Amino acid sequence: MRPPLVLTVAGSDSGGGAGIQADLKTMLALGVHGMSVITAVTAQNSQGVRGAWELPEEAVRAQYRAVVDDIGVQAVKTGMLASAALVETVAELLAGTDAPVVVDPVGVSKHGDPLLAASALDSVRTKLLPVATVATPNLDEVAQLTGVRVGSEADLTEAAAAILSYGPRWALIKGGHLEGEAVDLLTDGDEEHWLRAPRHDNRHTHGTGCTLASAVASGLAKGLSVPEAVREAKAYVTGAIAAGFALGAGIGPVDHGWRFRA
């Protein structure tokens, strides 16, 4: 039987910890067929991003149409989109696709390297977030997009409201940068779901955001509700963080195959 179909629209991470590589590993681990539209190529390792080159709009559009028009798709996840032109191109493509969309509004890498032009932020707000079923910003991305700075768990509700004001159906605000428990807030403005997990003493966390968003998209492709998909994705990424391993001289990746070795 054919597995559910999930498409990632994101950048390539040559070190294999984040981006397209993390997305496809997550999708395989969760039993869906992953497909890709590469938006940018990065020269990246455990210590940082050495360079990034975005693809032309026509290359992104051609990849997307090739997959969707022939194979079809049951969920889409977006990651690094690099520029305003690519954000707007991808938003237009998503608006014409009948599938749930998980938007990870990637702004910077785990090492602090910029992955989105400052000039693209308004396009993310006005073009991309309105077509999202779920938006999954971390606290730095919330601040970039809305100006809301989260200093404690109590601020997550304000952050979610600010993201929802741009039009996604659900906001998943990732509180992983706060002290204490790893707590996230999922809300559509009416119902709230607080997701908590123990914080693991592990600095090898490269790819957590990509992995979580891809896991949510995988759950939606399987027919789960948004809260169910997010809850399962949180459990998966928590296990992947716990099993993260050293790679190179810097920050290692989470372990996408942790369930196979548990």
Image: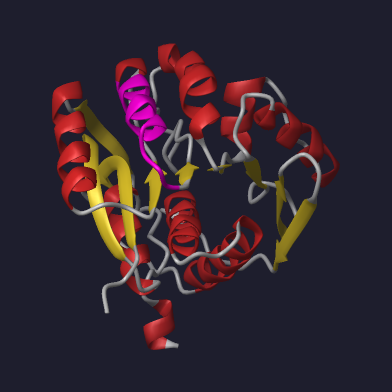
Q: Is residue 13 visible?
A: no
Where is residue 62? Give x, y as percent. Answer: 14, 33
For the record, the magenta segment spans 86-99
Give the image quarter of residue 229. bottom right
Where is residue 220? Give x, y as percent. Answer: 49, 59
Q: Is residue 177 visible?
A: yes
Image quarter of the N terminus:
bottom left
* Residue at (65, 22) in percent of width and height: 146
* Residue at (15, 24) in percent of width and height: 58
Residue 70 among magenta residues: no
Where 240 sits versus 230, above or below? below
Most extreme residue toward the right is 154
Residue 88 among magenta residues: yes
Give the image quarter of residue 112. top left
Where 120 sits versus 24, above or below? above
Q: Is residue 168 left or right of residue 106?
A: right
* Residue at (57, 39) in percent of width and height: 137
Render colour scheme? secondary structure
Q: Magenta region's main secondary structure?
A: helix
Q: Is residue 195 left or right of residue 84?
A: right
Q: Is residue 29 left or right of residue 43?
A: right
Give the image quarter of residue 249. bottom left
Q: Is residue 171 left or right of residue 14?
A: right
Where is residue 257? Give x, y as percent. Answer: 36, 75
Most extreme residue toward the top is 119
Image quarter of the C terminus:
bottom left
Where is residue 135? Give x, y as percent. Answer: 56, 40
**Total number of numbered discs in the rendering:** 0
